[in-house]
Amino acid sequence: MSDVRRVQSGSPWEEAFGFARAVAAGDRVVVGGTTSFKGMVLYGEGDPYEQTRVAIANALDAIGEFGIGAESVVRTRLLLTHARDVDEAGRAHREVFDSVRPVMTMMVVSGFVDPRILVEVEMEAFLGGARDPYEEPDQS
């Protein structure tokens, strides 16, 4: 039996391109590139702050399907189409993750499949129960 579970968001691209929004394998959860689309509606058109906020919420909804939330996120990647949007995307990220402090990479890319998309978010999280590698194993 496989220990791999998948979550679909209902995006038409998932079916067309054959992918899942999020995949859990063991204690690791990975969320693929997530935008501010909900169905066929783009939220925050022209607004990098709002697009980042909604994209993060969409990615958190995906990991929520595995029973975890923002506190379990250990890595985020923000992909932006314009360097001018770094501060606004970073502000939206901080509002969610200020107390969590996952590692973060922010990159400027040449564009996305829909030119209205300004921001895409990727996320990695852990389901918990993983032993701290620096902790002594329980001898009981």
Image (cartoon, rainbow, N blue to C red):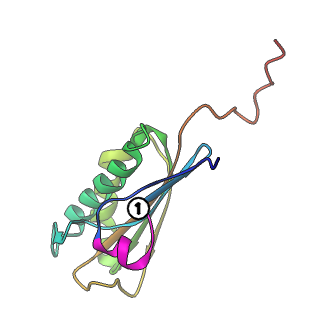
Q: Residue furthest top?
A: 140
Q: Residue furthest front?
A: 1
Query: Which is more toward the observer, 11 or 55?
Result: 11
Residue 75 placed where, x, y %? 51, 54
Q: Residue at x 37, y 51 (%)?
A: 62
Residue 74 placed where, x, y %? 53, 48
* Secondary structure of residue under mark 1: loop
Residue 139 placed where, x, y %? 84, 16
Does the magenta run of residues contain 16?
Answer: yes
Q: Residue at x 65, y 35 (%)?
A: 130
Where 21 falls versus 101 (above or below)?
below
Q: Residue at x 25, y 57 (%)?
A: 53
Where 12 falls versus 61 (above or below)?
below
Instruction: Give the quadrant of residue 122.
Output: bottom left
Where 26 falls versus 47 (above or below)?
above
Residue type marked 1:
Arg
Q: Which residue is mark 1?
A: 21
Where 29 falls versus 50 (above or below)?
above
Q: Main secondary structure of the magenta part?
A: helix
Query: Which is more toward the observer, 107 or 65?
Result: 65
Residue 39 placed where, x, y %? 20, 66
Classify mark 1: residues with Cα within 10 Å, few (<14), some (14-19) or many (20+): many
Q: Please state the extent of the stretch shown in magenta in the rendering.
A: 12-20
Q: Residue at x 80, y 24 (%)?
A: 137
Does the magenta run of residues contain 45?
Answer: no
Instruction: Give the quadrant of residue 98.
Output: top left
Q: Is residue 4 left or right of 10 when viewed as pictured?
A: right
